[in-house]
Image (spheres, grey):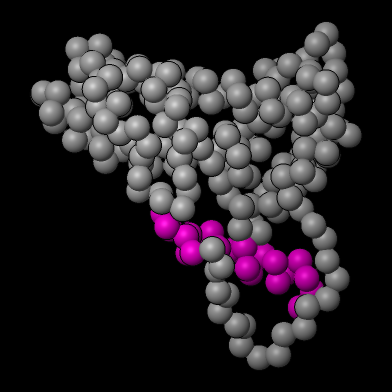
Amino acid sequence: MDYDTWLRYVGAYKNLTRREEEPPDVVIQPLPGRVKVVGGTKVDAAYIIALVGEKTKVVDGIRVIDEESFRIILEQIQEFSDLGQKKAADVLGAFLKDLQTGKVPAGENADAAFAGWKAAQYEQELSDFSAEWGLKANILDSAVRAYDGSSPETVPLLEEIKESLDFEQAEVKHGPSRRKHWYALGERLPVWVKETRESYLT
C-alpha cells in the first residue's frame, strides 16, 4: 500500500480507539499479509493554515475565500481528520466556515487570523458555559488554563469553582436544588474543561 493509505488506517484506528485517558503511544494492530509503505504526504494543522493563507485574500479588513478554494481546503481538513486528528480538524472546519461567511477578521496573516478566531471562540464558550451554570468566568478561565492533560479527570481549582457557583444566577437549572445542580456540573465539568482546553488553547 502507499503511505497515504497507511496513514488513513492509522488515523481511523486512533479516532475509533481514543478515550478520555489516552496512552502516550497508540499501538497499531498490524495489517494482515505483507505491507509495504511507499510515498508520502504531510497534512497537519500548520499545512492547512498555510493553505488558508495562500487561498484567501483580504477585503475591507475581512479574510475572504472563493468556493473552489473553500472546497480544496475542506478536502484537506477531511484528510487531516482521517489521519486521526478529528478534534483538531473539527476546529479547523468551524474556522473555515466562519471564514467563508465573513466572520474572520484579516489578522496580520493566516496564523494570526486563526489565533484571533480561536481566542474569540474560547471567550464565547467560556461566557456561555459560565452563564449556563452560574459560575464566575474568571475562575473557570483559570481552571481551564491550569488543566493538565496527564490527569484528565482532575479539574483545577475545583473548590474555588464550587464556592463561586450561584444557583440563582444559573441560566439553566440542572436540578431542583444547588446540590443537585452541583452534582450535574461535576459530571460535565471534566469533559468540558478537557475539550475546551484542547480545542482552543493548544
Figure quadrant of residue 137: top left
Q: Residue at x 66, y 59 (%)?
A: 83
- Give the quarter of the image for residue 107: top right
What is the x, y in percent for residue 11? Answer: 62, 62
Image: 171 above or below 161: above
On the image, the x and y values in percent for residue 58 come to: 85, 18
Q: Nearer the viewer, residue 168 or 17?
A: 168
Residue that appears at 48% across and 48% down: 149
In the rendered structure, which segment of residues is drawn in magenta? 1-23
Q: Main secondary structure of the magenta part?
A: helix
- Identify which residue, 159 or 17, lies in the foreground: 159
Q: How many marks?
A: 0
Q: Is residue 119 left or right of residue 175?
A: right
Residue 131 appears in view: yes
> What residue is rendered at 41% in x and 51% in y?
151
Asked if residue 67 shows in the view, the reply is no
Examine the rendered structure and indicate whether residue 165 appears above or below residue 52: above
Quadrant into which the N terminus falls:
bottom right
Q: Nearer the viewer, residue 139 or 98?
A: 139
Q: Position of residue 93 (x, y in %)?
A: 64, 37
Indicate left or right for 50 with 156 as reference.
right
**Residue 58 falls inside the magenta stretch:** no
Residue closest to the far bottom: 33
| Residue in the picture at 55% in, 68% down | 26
